[in-house]
Amino acid sequence: MSERVAVRKTYKLFIGGKFPRSESGRSYLVQDTNVSLASRKDARDAVVAARAAVPGWAGATAYNRGQILYRVAEMLEGRREQFVALGVPADEVDAAIDRWVWYAGWSDKLPQVYGGANPVAGPYFNLSAPEPTGVVAVVAPQSPALLGLVSVVAPAIVTGNTVVAAASPSAPLAAVTLAEVLATSDLPGGVVNILTGRITETVPTLANHLDVNAIDLTGVTDADLATDLEVGAAQNLKRVLRPAPADHDWFADPGITRMTALLETKTVWHPKGT
Amino acid sequence: MFEYAPAPESRAIVDIRPTYGLFINGEFVDGGDPHKSINPATEEVLAEVSWADAADVDRAVRAAREAYDRVWGPMPGRDRAKYLFRIARLIQERSRELAVLESLDNGKPIRESRDVDLPLVAAHFFYYAGWADKLEYAGFGGRPTSQHSGPQPRPLGVAAQVIPWNFPLLMLAWKIAPALAAGNTVVLKPAETTPLTALLFAEICQQADLPAGVVNIVTGAGETGRALVEHPGVDKVAFTGSTEVGRAIARAVAGTRKKLTLELGGKAANIVFDDAPVDQAVEGIVNGIFFNQGHVCCAGSRLLVQESVADRVLESLKRRMAQLRVGDPLDKNTDIGAINSAAQLARIREISDSGSAEGAERWSPPCELPERGFWFAPTVFTGVTQAHRIAREEIFGPVLSVLTFRTPAEAVEKANNTPYGLSAGIWTDKGSRILWLADRLRAGVVWANTFNKFDPTSPFGGYKESGYGREGGRHGLEGYLNV
């Protein structure tokens, strides 16, 4: 009997809940595998998909978002071996799963920690509550490919933002496989969009895009590029997270600042009286 | 009234064992004398359940202590969270089974156990699961700005928890979820008339591979509860039930180091102003007092209606009450199920009779009640004064007392004229009046243009003799932390 010939997987982009190839028809070779090389147009399409997903996702209950993030953890746990086969260390996969669980629990708690009643000096009810800022572009750290991507995407979406993520160019297979996890976790299409390819090609488009509300430059290693991107972001006053230090420990307790950096605070006044 | 064909939920989904022991240290063990748990809608015996004596309670507390010292206390919050998430998922997966069993043992309509109790139970575990690894962010100690320094919030140890029969599984969730999230272990006593879902929950703990001794369930009545609360090995007492028993527990823990939270009775005012949309208000009044047969500590049992609209509201209310379907709890069309026990039915009858005797006018819609089981038709009293027993005492049944008021100040005065302070309702189109009134109501939960809303993120608990401490939300952790 002849040996079975394997069916190989095509690694594509993840935009609007679908897996298109790059509109440019290009790919690049990583780990003997062709991976889509996203273009500026793909980046713009991803922003459109992310924007379209905002009302539904931001409008979902915190409980619902929490359930979905926890579902991502469940699905990721089920594909643990697949990531290990791609070369992701097992402890990194475990940490990535736990990170989804950590952020899942924040969905209905952050407003209780980061908002509250303000005792103004007058007969007014006054309450501050966080709201998502909107569409967030994130540049995932080059490494660790899976934990890094999860660590920047999960805190952005748990509060109701939608994301366009530029995956690590050198390790995109884990990112595309994560997209397959997201696509089967009841996460609405467009909440997370993942681009593979060159940071220098897609990220300037995102930084200069007027329908992007915030940009997380965590994975940008070139200081000059980071400055250019920040300057671009200033056009519409995007909220900016600056690059992470090279020695950042992605396994450590992430805290809550990645969430709070991507939130608006809304304060409501209402008079009290008969 | 429309004729509805019966639409009974199948009880085949639930497999009730003929006898149940106690759940101690991860296993079902023999306990004290067996007692019957009956279906209040039919008086049929559902199962025989052991009642724990002092020695059984001692075993359970020791198991909880052992689990606290060796496993649950030292376990990282992240891992405790995973067990709680598992439990939440198992409850979701087995929700219909739990709902049917709850309706069988308690008498509440399947529509409520299925659509209210069970979703809230699962959500409560899900919510507190997420807190288990975030306690230092809850505001009770620990410094999030310097993550690995500063005092971290610590659990108390072993929690003794005694819950009532009106929302058996939901009250279990309110007690167990925050206790476990904070790192405590528990010994829980369900009510003697509704032990079955707690025992099914014990199976779920086994299914989740929850370490032995973290959750222990001891069934029984007042004596079992007393032995548990007074056991010197418990660090925390949490009780939901009557104010009378709550007072006795407060006396019993006096002079000990036990931390105490109490969620007790209520006599909530539901205040309807003349600018409120009448139909919505009537729905809220009906939900407020007839939800769960009125077996609700925060029930809107005193309707305060502005004099100018009293006739209109009452006419509409009576018309709506005539549409309520009383009967088989497992029928999906049923609005009002069975009264939970013969004893509770006797109490409702006794206080209601006092209402008539003291001069209030009693009305119930024509309503055919089943012959077997414990039933009480939805009832409204008008012409009630603040001196009447039906305006002062918690009836814990489908009985509404109607009083009137003229000014907002009078509404506040009357609403607060009670030793209780659990909840209140306000119905008006004017936002500023809602907030003005909410400031003045001495009640732990104020519902505006809605009633009987619950959510795991929202703290619940009373002022005054309705108890102290809050369950739910960030505040719900405080009762289970050493702060």
Image: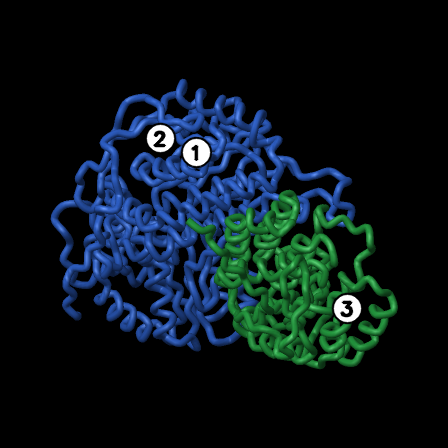
Q: Position of residue B283 (x, y in %)?
A: 34, 68
Q: Are marks 3 and 2 on the same chain?
A: no
Residue A166 is situated, as x and y percent measured from the top left of the image, at 69, 67
Quarter of the rendering occupied by the N terminus of chain B? bottom left
Q: Nearer the viewer, mark 3 or mark 2?
A: 3
Instruction: Identify the element where label 2 is drawn.
Output: loop
Chain ID of residue with mark 1: B
Rendering coords of residue A256 (x, y %): 70, 55
What is the drawing colour of chain A? green
Vertical placement of residue A272 versus A96, above or below: below
Task: Please determine whether, in this image, residue A31 is positioned above or below residue B177.
Answer: below
Q: Which type of secondary structure does the marked residue at label 1 adopt?
A: strand
Q: Nearer the viewer, residue A15 or B252?
A: A15
Subunit bearing disc 3: A
- Residues at marks 3 and 1 touching, judged by CB atoms closer than 8 Å: no
Are dots 3 and 1 on a single chain? no
> In the structure shown, which secondary structural element does the residue marked by tag 3 occupy?
strand
Question: Looking at the rendered structure, which numbered label has been put on residue A240?
Answer: 3
Name the one closer to the observer, A221 or B105.
Answer: A221
Which residue appears at 67% of the width and 70% of the height? A136
- Horizontal relation, residue A84 to residue B385: left or right: right
Extreme residue in the top direction: B55
Judging from the image, mark 2 belongs to the subunit labelled B
Q: Quadrant of residue A126?
A: bottom right
User: Which residue, given by chain and number where applicable, does mark 1 sit on?
Assistant: B188
Q: CA distance from mark 3 to mark 1?
A: 50 Å
Q: Residue type at mark 3?
A: Val
Which residue is label 2 attached to? B219
> The residue under label 2 is which amino acid type?
Thr
